[in-house]
Image (cartoon, grey):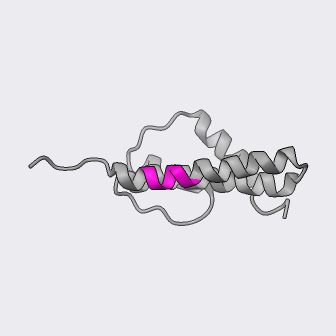
Amino acid sequence: MATQLFDEEEYSRWLGQAEHTLASAQRDVEAGDYAWACFKAQQAGEYAVKGLMWGFGLPAFGHSTLMLLEQAGEQGLPLPKEAQGWARTLDRHYIPPC
């Protein structure tokens, strides 16, 4: 039996929640509820990163997308350099808008 290297089910579960949350954020933008949109966009990013990490069997705790990405990188996951900038932007809008 082959060793499973990636937990597709766990990744898909987290990614599905990220997509659902991002769609909700888009509806908030359309309704002019920008504070909630910012909060939910960060949540969606957090869920996506956690999904990737849990998919590879890496622990993923906390709410900062930047810190999660840094932890993923430390564990050897190759990530685009732009991802840290995106995560930093999301994290800036996590608490202040609410």
For this rendering, which residue is in front, 52 or 1?
A: 1
User: From this viewpoint, which residue is outermost toward the left?
Assistant: 1
Q: In the rendered image, which quarter is residue 85 located in?
A: top right
**Left or right: 89 as drawn, with respect to 97:** left
Which quarter of the rendering shows the C terminus?
A: bottom right
Visible in this render: residue 66?
Answer: no
Quarter-of-image position of residue 91: bottom right
Q: Residue at x 67, y 41 (%)?
A: 86
Q: What percent of the width, then of the height, locates residue 64?
A: 63, 59
Residue visible at 44% across and 50% down in the picture: 12
Residue range in magenta is: 12-17
Q: Determine if the magenta segment contains residue 25.
A: no
Q: Name the residue located 61 percent from the left edge and 63 percent from the top edge.
A: 63
Query: What kind of secondary structure does the magenta stretch mostly adopt?
Result: helix
Where is residue 75? Give x, y as percent: 39, 51
Nearest the eye: 6 or 26 = 26
- Specify whether residue 95 is in view: yes
15 falls in the magenta region: yes
The number of callouts visible is 0
Is 7 left, or right, of 13 in this rendering?
A: left
| Residue at the right extreme, as displayed | 32
Q: Quadrant of residue 68?
A: bottom right
In percent of width and height, residue 74 lies at 43, 50
Q: Is residue 49 left or right of residue 96?
A: left
For the point 38% across and 57% down, the residue is 58
